[in-house]
Every structure is written in C-alpha cells, then in structure tokens.
Image (spheres, rainbow, N blue to C red):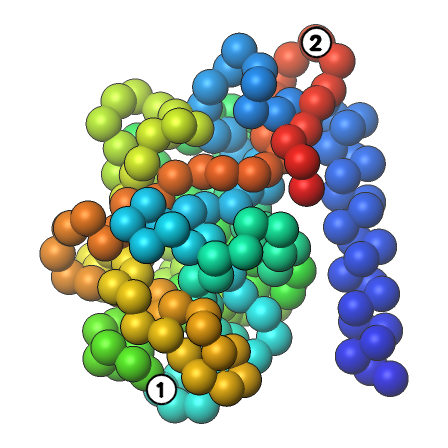
Amino acid sequence: MMSYVKEITLRVFFKFFLLLCILLQCEGRETEVSYVTCGSLVKLLNTRHNVRLHSHDVKYGSGSGQQSVTGVEAADDANSYWRIREKPNSTCQRGAPIRCGQAIRITHMKTGRNLHSHHFSSPLSNNQEVSAFGENGEGDDLDVWTVQCSGTYWERDEAVRFKHKGTEVFLSVTGEQYGHPIRGQREVHGMSSPSHHNYWRVMEGVFIQPSLEAPRHDEL
C-alpha cells in the first residue's frame, strides 16, 4: 500500500514539475540558448558505453547498502531523469547557465536522492561505489560534483566529466553488467583517473531558461 501511495505521489510531483516548468518558461534543446542551466531536468548519457545514468528504489546488497545507481540503454525510462541543482548552502539562479568548474548536486527526480560517492568498493569492478543518498534532495557534502568542460559554460552538446568533490573520483562506466534483480544494467562507479569511460552528454530533458519566449521542452 505504501509503495502504491509513493508511486502516485511521484507521478503527481512529476506532472506538477512539468506544469511549473511551463509556467516558468522552460525550453527544449531546439532553443538558441545552448547551455545546461540551473534547475534543468536532464538525462545523462555515458558516451563510451551508450547508457543513461539511472537510479531506482533498489538498494545495494553490499558496500553502503544505499540506493543503487546504474546505467541503462533504454532512452524512455523515467527513472533516468536528474535535476541539476546548486551545492549545499549555496544558491544558483533558476535558468542560469552552469559554469565549467562549478560545484553542483545532481538529484534523482523520482526518489529525491542525490548522486553520491564515498569510500566503499563498487560491487562488480571494485572501483569506488556511486549511490543515491539523502531525502527530499537533502543529503551531505559527499553529494557534490564539479562539472569539467572546456569552455566557460556547460554546453548541451558537449561531452563533460563529473569529478566528485569529496574524493576526487570521476563518474564512470566500464561495462560490467548486473544480474537479478536489475539484469543487464551497467555498474556506475568512481574512477581515480580521467579516461574515455567518464564522459557524459546531456540527452533528453527540460531546460529552464530566463526567456520571454514561449516555453518548449524535449520529448519526455
């Protein structure tokens, strides 16, 4: 009963977010503004392994026991939406472009938990575990990642890296696949060195822009 109520609540929240986004003038990939912005809701694709960053209310059976983070091939899974937010005890103006080098939080839309890492080993590759942590978007300082990109701002079509502020690992995928109950999903983990395994690009999403034009959004 509780899981049913939670699912209904999440659906209502998702629809409310989209309505709010329209009222606040959200725009899609086709707009002239080409940056990822604060408050945007996006899917992130690992460009090496062609999987989207994903989470769900399934806990790791080892390590921290926190909510698992994986990579999935499906493009239409709503559990792959993440919201780009300010770091703790900070603010970023809604619709403001994210700067290269800026510290951010990446919050899972459906569960409200933040992309997180810490000194636990990942279950398959023995790299550093990446999890989803916190409640209602609030966790701790290990939820903070810096955007590594080449210009001034994080461009939508640019492949970028995410470096964990607390432990200095890079958000990565190297191809290991889980079995039951999340068969076929890829392990997401932290790696100490930059490589082609830790490039990510924004795909589908709802982008919040400070604009006077009519609002639009990408296919959800």
Residue marked by disc 2:
212
User: Looking at the rendering, in which quadrant would you find the C terminus?
Assistant: top right
Question: In the rendered view, would you say 202 is above or below 155?
Answer: below
Res 214 → quadrant: top right
What residue is rendered at 27% in x and 33% in y? 149
Q: As rendered, which of 134 and 191 lies closer to the eye?
A: 191
Residue 202, image x, y percentages: 45, 38
Say whether residue 18 is visible. yes
Which residue was labeled with disc 1? Answer: 63
| Residue nearest the observer in this picture, 159 or 213 | 159
Residue 192 x/y as whole percent = 15, 61
Q: Residue at x 59, y 37 (%)?
A: 205
Residue 97 shown left or right of residue 109 in the figure: left
Q: CA distance from mark 1 to mark 2?
A: 48 Å
Q: Circle 1 — which element?
A: loop
The N terminus sits in image quarter: bottom right
